[in-house]
Image (spheres, rainbow, N blue to C red):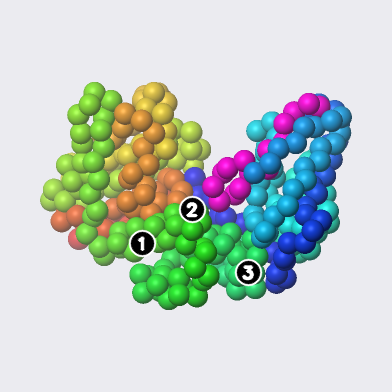
């Protein structure tokens, strides 16, 4: 499901290491997590940077850094985003808020300012401002990554943006992923011909998107997953269109992504989906990577030749688009 990446922003201050290093003190409301391990991980790579043990209602993690960076604290499966920076950082585990050092304090302030952000476009404005003000600290690459994930860009626009970032950003896994996502969206934008992909099914056979798209009828393709609530809620809307137009100039296809095959089959039966669904032999990621899909459900309509007519419509707007295609 679509998630607007609205979390927290940061300050215009550049933070440099000093001899004292960082000290993160985590406070807990009770002793239920006593003896649990706290993992300080890199937000970019997911690697564990340091650990600590909870003693009663408190845990302390110390270390030294060359540069500040965006991180996650993970304890008992729960997460807290924060900036690791030199100084004393206090984390309230009940609220998952880090404070007490400049970047984290400013980050919390900007998080409050973003509470009324409603669209990705609005979020992109905040992220870009944070990136420009924080190019030389740990907020910069994090903000730039989120900006790319929110802001639709053409390939020339992307190249212009990349010319404005420090070369070190290109070493960040999440920045690389966001760049690949922007490129995928550009080549699969409305008006472009479909990009094919191949899926290996559970029985070892293969199936391609081109087996269904570009065959002389409009084709509605729904990228979805069994665990996705909005995906499941959209199925009745698609089913109504199927009953109205299937075999009358429009075909329907599901592509199960980010899901376990067994869960997909169970959902197909529960939801009584009458159209074919491409199910891989494992958790599928290639289709969404090829189309730069960040959230599901994501529905694409292809014309009879395989050209992309629309992307991302749901509910009433999707029905209106399908009606317009069928009226031609």
Furthest residue toward left: 216
Pick whichever of labels 1 and 2 is earlier in the sequence: 2
Callout 2: 10 Å neighbours few (<14), some, many (20+)?
Answer: some
Pick whichever of labels 3 and 2 is earlier in the sequence: 3
In the displayed structure image, the side of residue 88 where residue 64 appears, left or right = left
Judge by depth and name the residue closer to the eye, 88 or 301. Answer: 88
Callout 1: 10 Å neighbours few (<14), some, many (20+)?
Answer: many
The residue sitting at 19% across, 55% down in the picture is 306
Judge by depth and name the residue closer to the eye, 177 or 240. Answer: 177
State yes or no: residue 326 in magenta.
Answer: no
Please state which of the two labelled residues, at mark 1 or mark 2, is closer to the viewer: 2
| Rendered-image quadrant of the C terminus | bottom left
Query: Residue 136 location, x and y as percent?
Result: 63, 69
Residue position marked by numbered label 2 in the rendering? 173
- Mark pair 3, 2: CA separation: 18 Å
Residue position marked by numbered label 3 in the rendering? 136
- Helix, strand or loop status at disc 1: helix
Contact (Cβ within 8 Å) of mark 3 with mark 2: no
- Mark pair 1, 2: CA separation: 16 Å
The residue sitting at 36% across, 30% down in the picture is 282
State yes or no: residue 41 in magenta.
Answer: yes
Judge by depth and name the residue closer to the eye, 150 or 216. Answer: 150
In the displayed structure image, the side of residue 56 where residue 316 appears, left or right = left
């Amino acid at each position: 499901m679509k998630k607007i990446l609205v979390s927290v922003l940061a300050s215009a201050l550049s933070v440099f290491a000093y001899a004292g290093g960082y000290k993160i003190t985590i406070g807990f409301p009770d002793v239920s997590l006593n003896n649990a391990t706290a993992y300080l991980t890199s937000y970019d790579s997911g690697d564990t940077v340091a650990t600590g043990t909870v003693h009663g209602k408190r845990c302390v993690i110390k270390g030294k850094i060359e540069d500040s960076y965006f991180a996650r604290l993970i304890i008992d499966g729960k997460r807290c985003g924060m900036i690791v920076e030199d100084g004393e950082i206090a984390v309230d585990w009940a609220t998952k808020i880090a404070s007490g050092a400049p970047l984290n304090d400013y980050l919390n302030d900007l998080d409050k300012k973003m509470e009324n952000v409603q669209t990705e476009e609005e979020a992109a404005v905040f992220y870009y401002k944070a990136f420009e003000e924080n190019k030389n600290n740990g907020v910069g690459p994090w903000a730039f990554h989120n900006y790319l994930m929110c802001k639709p860009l053409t390939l020339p626009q992307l190249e212009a943006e990349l010319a404005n970032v420090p070369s070190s950003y290109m070493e960040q896994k999440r920045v690389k992923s966001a760049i690949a996502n922007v490129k995928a969206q550009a080549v699969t934008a409305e008006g472009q011909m479909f990009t094919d992909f191949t899926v290996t099914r559970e029985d070892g056979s293969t199936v391609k998107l081109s087996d269904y798209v570009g065959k002389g009828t409009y084709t509605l393709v729904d990228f979805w997953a069994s665990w996705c609530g909005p995906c499941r809620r959209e199925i009745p809307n698609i089913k109504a269109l199927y009953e109205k137009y299937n075999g009358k100039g429009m075909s329907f296809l599901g592509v199960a992504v980010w899901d376990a095959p067994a869960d997909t089959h169970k959902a197909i039966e529960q939801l009584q989906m009458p159209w074919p669904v491409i199910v891989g032999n494992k958790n599928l990621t290639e289709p969404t990577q090829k189309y730069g899909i960040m959230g599901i459900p994501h529905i694409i309509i292809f014309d009879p030749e395989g050209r992309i007519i629309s992307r991302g419509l749901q509910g009433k707007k999707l029905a209106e688009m399908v009606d317009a295609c069928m009226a031609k």
